[in-house]
Image (spheres, helix red, strand yellow):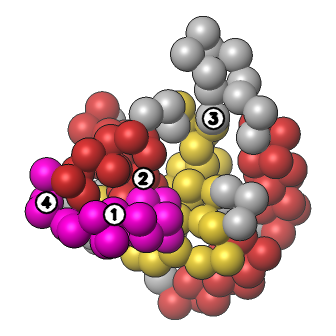
Amino acid sequence: MPRIIAIDYGQKRTGIAVTDELQIIASGLTTIPSATAIDFLKTYFSKEKVEAVLIGEPKQMNGEPSQSASIIKGFVTHFTNHFPEMKVIRVDERFTSKMAFQSMIDGGLSKKQRQNKALIDEISATIMLQDYLNRK
C-alpha cells in the first residue's frame, strides 16, 4: 500500500511526516529548509510510493485564513506544478503547534529540547497526519 505524507510548510522550515505502509501510524520523517522542499519530495517520491500529500491549511479561530495562508497557497501551486498527478489534501492545522509543544512536555523533553522549532514542525506534521488517519 502506498504511503501518505503530511507537510507542515512554513516560511523557513517544513516539517514532514509519513505513514507506515499500512497507513495506520504516522511518524515524523524530518524537518527541512522550506526552500528545499520540492527537491526533497522529488527524491522521496522516486524511492517510495506515495498515494496522497496532506498540506496544512492555516486558519484563525474564526475559520478565516491566517496570515501565512498566502505563503502556503503559493507552495501548493508550486507543488502541483511539479507533481500534477499527486493527490493533495488540505487539512486544518489549527492547534498543531500547541499540541506538538504539549506532547514534548508530556514526553519529558527538557526546556532546551522544547525550543527546537524544527522538532515542533515535524511533530506538528505527525499530529496532522495521525488525525487524518484517525478520521479516515
The tag earlier along the polypeptide, 2 or 3, is 3
Residue 48 on the magenta span: no
Per the model, the C-alpha gap separating discs 2 and 4 is: 15 Å
Q: Nearer the viewer, mark 4 or mark 1?
A: 1
Which residue in the structure is indicated by mark 2? Answer: 124
Q: Is residue 91 above or below residue 115?
A: above
Q: Which residues are magenta?
A: 106-121
Which residue in the structure is indicated by mark 1? Answer: 114
The tag earlier along the polypeptide, 1 or 3, is 3
* Quarter location, residue 112: bottom left
Q: Nearer the viewer, mark 1 or mark 2?
A: 1
Which residue in the structure is indicated by mark 3? Answer: 58
Relative depth, front residue between 50 and 130: 130
Q: Residue at x 62, y 21 (%)?
A: 60
Which residue in the structure is indicated by mark 4? Answer: 107
The tag earlier along the polypeptide, 2 or 4, is 4
Relative depth, front residue between 49 and 109: 109
Residue furthest to the front: 111
